[in-house]
Image (spheres, rainbow, N blue to C red):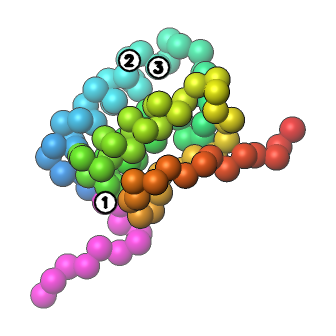
Amino acid sequence: MSEERTEATAPRPGPVAWVLLLPIRFYRKCISPFLPPACRFYPSCSAYAAQALTKHGAAKGTYLAIRRLLRCGPWTDPGLDPVPEKFTLRAQRPVETTEE
């Protein structure tokens, strides 16, 4: 019998992605609490990187995380920027929120 992954179960990172998640976890637990919240996107860049590595693996997740960090600056409009369900090399624009 083959085990099929269902939508309810979260993907597990591979061994390389797990190692790449260690500095992100360290940052989120030890450094981030002492800094003021300043991320322009939701989810935050560290949460986005952790989700990308978990969902897409080491190579694709690293690419998505670096691409996101390069977008995080005053030249980009803030907004909702979730990890894409399907990996593409093409960048997606963040969804602007209309809340005031």
Q: Please give the residue where the numbered disc 2 appears in the rendered image.
A: 30
Quarter of the picture holding the N terminus = bottom left
Q: Name the residue: 87% across, 38% down.
A: 100
Q: Is residue 38 left or right of residue 33?
A: right
Image point (24%, 47%), residue name = 59
Q: Residues within 10 Å of mark 2 (few under 14, many from 20)?
A: few
Give the camera-side residue of 38 and 10. Answer: 38
- Residue at image position (72%, 46%) is 96
How far apart marks 3 and 2 lie (CA) works out to 6 Å
Give the secondary structure at mark 2: helix
Q: Which mark is residue 46?
A: none
Q: Is residue 58 magenta?
A: no
Q: Are marks 3 and 1 in contact (CB under 8 Å)?
A: no
**Residue 63 in the image: x percent, y percent?**
33, 43
At which x and y percent is residue 54? 32, 50
Q: Nearer the viewer, residue 51 or 87?
A: 87
- Res. 10 visible in picture: yes
**Residue annotated with mark 3:** 32
Q: Quadrant of residue 67?
A: top left
SS state under label 3: helix
Give the class, few, some or many, for how many residues have Cα within 10 Å of label 1's Cα (few <14, many ≥20): some
Mark 3 and mark 2 in contact? Answer it, CB < 8 Å. yes
Residue 11: mark in rendering: 1
- Amino acid type assigned to the residue bearing label 3 in the image: Ser
**Sooner in the amino-acid sequence: mark 2 or mark 1:** 1
Q: Which residues are magenta?
A: 1-11
Instruction: Residue at 30% x, 50% y: name it.
Output: 60
Query: Of label 3 and label 1, which has the lower sequence position?
Result: 1
